[in-house]
Image: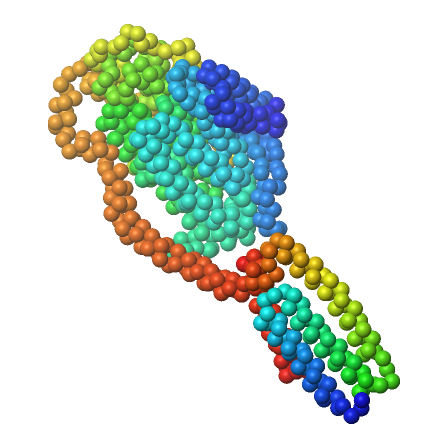
Amino acid sequence: MLNVTNILIILFLPFINFLILGLGSRSIKQPVSGTIATVSLLLAAGLSLMIGYQYFIVKGMVNGAFPPIELFRYPWMVFGSKLTIDMSLVLDPLTVMMLVVVTSVSAMVHLFSLGYMKGEERYTTYYAFLGLFTFSMLGLLLAGNLFQIYIFWELVGVSSFLLIGYYFSKPSAVAAAKKAFIVTRFADLGFLIGILILSFYGETLDIATLIQRLTAPAGSQSLAIQTAGWLGISALTWGLAMIFIGGAGKSAMFPLHIWLPDAMEGPTPVSALIHAATMVVAGVYLVARLFPIFQLSACILDLITYTGIFSAFFAAIIACTQTDIKRVLAYSTMSQIGYMMFSLGIARPEDHYLGYMASLFHLFTHAFFKSLLFLGAGAVIHMIHSNEMNKMGGLRKFMPVTHITFLIACLAIAGIFPFAGFFSKEEILLATYHANFPVFVIALCTSGLTAFYMFRLYFSIFWGKHQAHDPHHSEGTFTMKFPLMLLMLCTLVAGFLPFSSWIFQGDTHETSHINWKFSLVPLSLSTLGILIAAYFFRKPSSRVADTLMWMGGIYRISKNKFYIDEIYLWITQRVLFPLVGKPAAWVDKNIIDGTVNGVGNFVGSIYYFIRGMQSGKLQDYLLYFLAGIAAWMVYFIYIWK
Amino acid sequence: MSHIPLQHVLIFSTALFFIGMFGMFTRRNLITLLMSVELMLNSVNINLAAFNKYLYPQQTGGLFLALFIIIIAAAEAAIAIAIIINLYRSHHSIDVDDATEMKY
């Protein structure tokens, strides 16, 4: 089961979809293309579930750890003895877990899109792009080599760009796609520099070898990277910081988060797949993948912790005031990824890296309930034809399935027992409590806020004032309801999986346990958040308006997302463009172009001079001939001895 | 015969050579150019014969070389006239200034 063929099938099924549907985007008609893509993705999801079962349960642990399996290795580029770049596929617990998450969420999104995208003009192209995205994400996960990861990392960015800009006739979608691409590209530059620094000192790009070399306490490579430095900071720290910048860009960490809310311009299932469950956690995945190296630098771990906790809290505040339901979900995604990040940052050997496990557990559960939330929002948008909260209300009677599944997802993200989010968030909070108390306090507040804004969303959509709805609009087809129900099932079950015995760092692992005394505080805070949301939003009342009057400026700042976009605009338009862009343009136009044109003109003038000699007149050639003979004569008579 | 000094012969052949060269540079008619080439070749022949006669009277190498040059000149004249005829067919002229397409 765990052989290279199956993995290649999983990896290339979406790619074949991309090729077939991309090439036949005009000739393959609506239901056919969607069905092809959905069936093959369901196949891939089934295969990866079987692989997960085989890897974790049938094959099991060897000497207290899951050994990584290298399925395939091929020397791809050989640049002499020191630098070879291999292409390799590696299965380790992290990869297998992510494989299951990505293929199953992708399959659900494919299925959901059958109904959601029905009647769209570029339906086949849409499925082709989804295939490209799934392929690149799977490639990113399976890569055993930093260079390979980087290639797929960029491919993921491209497919995200294509899907955000799917409605390219809308200027806002085009702007959002460009913004997402430029911001993540900027962060990827950091990633590239980080890769170069690490591989320069580690003398390899292979991840396993790199980790082994840099973590060896007295190895020549690890000594070299720790002693070399710039501005008083070691090369190791620089490299890791740069890699973290790449991860922070993809994972929408403050201050590189600005692209994520705008990315909601894409079709909603795309947001569920790319901007909730899979691509945005690539940064977390990257840090987790290289965690043994990150662990060598305490200050980078602190950087990760504080970036994560700040993003989590910051995004939660903004999410409380947004009125576009997809933007609320986007900020909540950012907040939850912040949880994963700081949980990685506080993982220490003292508590057997509980934070590491908790972070990936949260990644796992979050993928399910967040994609469920997005798909639910998609169903609502499909019915209402608007993203705005104030156009919704009282939908629980019209869309019962969506209502129940959405409620369960909200309870899960708020961390209520016994839904998936409870277990993972509990582990994160427990790990933080032992490692860093101030961070723990902020995380607690954030989890209360999370419950509040999620239930604000829930009550505004499904309760509140009754809007007049068109009775002809129904809840959607079976293909739209089925993924919701399946993901709801995952949300119910995921928390009970023995996750901590599957994915852990170090030699020993803690069995997961629920410490009820500890859980009391977060649970009651979440309940409080839900109650406050219910108080304000369950029935239409003047309470909201009154409180907003009282809040005044704070509300405005949060509603305007702390003016981060405006700050970026000011920096680029007022600082970067006139102070850097214009001089650079001048240098380019005058000095660089001038040099190139000067060389061109010089060569051209030589050409005009020589051209005149080729007159085509016989006697001119005769003259040159004579001159040549005269020159030879002079040479032979006076110079040559 | 022997009262004519070698220098006189050489002066004559040099004069002949430069008359040929003058023709090469000033004339535009290909037939005239061909005649100029013949003049130059013949001046060389005179040189060869004269040196043979005055310096090595017992040997005949110079004379034979002159004979070879005469034969080659005949062949060259045949080819040159063939070229001139072809040029006339395509350009309706045997003026070298009219055939300047092979430039640049």
Question: Image height check: is A576 above or below A561?
Answer: below
To which quarter of the image does residue A332 belong?
top left
Q: Quadrant of the C terminus of chain A?
A: bottom right
Q: Nearer the viewer, residue A477 or A227?
A: A477
Q: Quadrant of the N terminus of chain A?
A: top right
Give the residue at x 58% y 72%. B26
**Residue at the outermost front position:** B92
**Scheme by which the image is coloured:** rainbow
Give the residue at x 72% y 65%. B77
* Count of residue discs: 0
Position in image of residue A94 (x %, y %): 50, 31
Q: On the rendered structure, is B78 left or right of A161? A: right
Give the residue at x 22% y 10%. A468
Give the residue at x 33% y 55%. A586
**Residue A35 visible in this rendered orientation of the protein:** no
Position in image of residue A241 (x %, y %): 40, 45
To which quarter of the image does residue B45 belong?
bottom right
Q: On the rendered structure, is B36 left or right of A189? A: right
**Residue A226 visible in this rendered orientation of the protein:** yes
Q: On the rendered structure, is A179 left or right of A627? A: left
Position in image of residue A579 (x %, y %): 28, 52
**Residue at the outermost bottom position:** B3
Question: Image height check: is B26 above or below A496?
Answer: below
Q: Nearer the viewer, residue A542 or A22?
A: A22
Position in image of residue A426 (x %, y %): 37, 26
Q: Nearer the viewer, residue B54 or B22?
A: B22
